Image: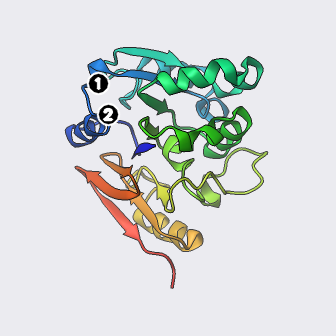
Amino acid sequence: MKLLLTSAGVNNTSIRDALVDLLGKPIADSSALCIPTAAYPMGGPASAWRFITGQTPLPMCDLGWKSLGVLELTALPSIGDRRWVSWVREADVLLVAGGDATYLCHWMRQSGLADLLPSLRDTVWVGLSAGSMVLTPRIGADFVEWRSAPDDRTLGVVDFSIFPHLGLEPDNTMAGAERWAAEIAGPAYAIDDQTAITVTDGTVEVVSEGHWRLFPPAA
């Protein structure tokens, strides 16, 4: 897949331009499916509704897509992959809400979406916070909220971890990011809400109008 991993959505010109570049066409000509699943454990149904309807300050579903549908991962096992896989393959982009990354990881595996990802070569994945973190190898113990999570491991689609919302007090300070990175031990990025990371064919690039830091793997 082509990845746009954000902290707070497509909220500046640089990130929007990166999205259009990944799509290879205007947003207005692109079909999207939004995935609100991660929002439920932490924000509840109101949070999921705000994400779907674009009623948040985190631009994702309200960017002017040609079409927009909802892909609720918890429903997919009861639908059957003969139906929902075609919906995913026909979409240009998947918009993935923030919330609880371990809960999202669980339902990506249970639904079968995680297994489908390697075959979606032209699809763009746009993650928001937990929607980005779920593709990393680990999120760190501080970000594990779901009580049923066995540990902090996630899907490992990319080989680096992400500390989002850098600079938001009191929890997401640079000092907090440093402690988190020491626990992660592997390569990791701390990114603020004006920053995103793109991944295309294994090439990683940071797109930023704000602040970020790369933590190299521990020696």
Query: In terms of secondary structure, where does tag 1 sit?
Result: helix
Q: In which quarter of the image is residue 8?
A: top left
Residue 204, position as x, y percentages in the image: 36, 58
Q: Quadrant of residue 112?
A: top right
- 44, 107: nearer the viewer: 107
Residue found at x 54% / y 74%? 182
Please name the amino acid that badge 1 sits on: Ile
Residue found at x 35% / y 49%? 198
Task: Determine whether label 1 and label 2 are within 8 Å by CB.
Answer: yes
Instruction: Give the labeled residue for mark 2.
Output: 23
Please name the amino acid that badge 2 sits on: Leu
Q: In this view, does 94 lie to the left or right of 83?
A: left
Q: Residue 50 carries which label?
A: none
Q: In which quarter of the image is residue 37?
A: top right
What is the spatial separation of the Cα atoms under label 1 and label 2, in whole angstroms? 8 Å
Q: Which mark is residue 27?
A: 1
Residue 192, position as x, y percentages in the image: 36, 51
Residue 39, position as x, y percentages in the image: 59, 31
